[in-house]
Image (cartoon, rainbow, N blue to C red):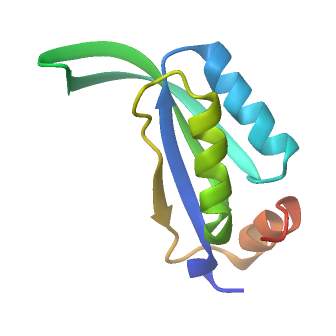
Amino acid sequence: MEASDYCLINTTTDTKENADAITQLLLEKKLIACVQSTVIESAYHWQGKIIKSKEIHLQMKTKRSLFQKIQKAIEHLHTYDIPEIIMVPITGANSLYLEWIEEETINS
């Protein structure tokens, strides 16, 4: 078990209901071990305008090997036309935490 086998996956969404649906499905399917959610303010270009809005940021802990399944599940549930789904590799972590992620997620 190497730290590089694990990752963080980030997405944002516009409603608590959508954030809760994504969180619930991914946890039920054991595709992620944990998710943290925070309300953030975002500013971005969209359809020729600068948009400012409140969003819910989800940061999920999982295995890199599950990324494609997680991406498909998020895309299926997401309310955005182009959702942010970014995987960030973990380059170092305490081994007990990595073992916990391993135990709480399915084998890929």
The residue under the point 74% across, 67% down is 97
Q: Is 21 situated left or right of 89 in this image? A: right
The residue under the point 67% across, 55% down is 69
Q: Is residue 96 above or below residue 8?
A: below
Quarter where residue 61 is shown = bottom right
**Image spot of residue 10 (x, y percent):** 50, 45
Q: For the N terminus, give its image quadrant.
A: bottom right
Q: Nearer the viewer, residue 65 or 94?
A: 65
Q: Nearer the viewer, residue 60 or 22?
A: 22
**Image spot of residue 91 (x, y percent):** 49, 77
Quarter where residue 83 is shown = top left
Q: Is residue 3 above or below residue 17?
A: below
Q: Is 47 situated left or right of 62 in this image? A: left
Q: Nearer the viewer, residue 2 or 87?
A: 87
List the single residue furthest toward the left. 48
Q: Is 17 situated left or right of 39 in this image? A: right
The residue under the point 79% across, 32% down is 24
Q: Is residue 104 above or below residue 74?
A: below
Quarter where residue 53 is shown = top left
**Image spot of residue 62 (x, y percent):** 68, 60
List the single residue furthest toward the bottom. 1
Numbered marks: total = 0
Q: Is residue 6 above or below residue 45?
A: below
The residue under the point 56% across, 38% down is 75
Q: For the C terminus, give its image quadrant.
A: bottom right
Q: Is 49 situated left or right of 24 in this image? A: left
**Image spot of residue 50 (x, y percent):** 15, 17
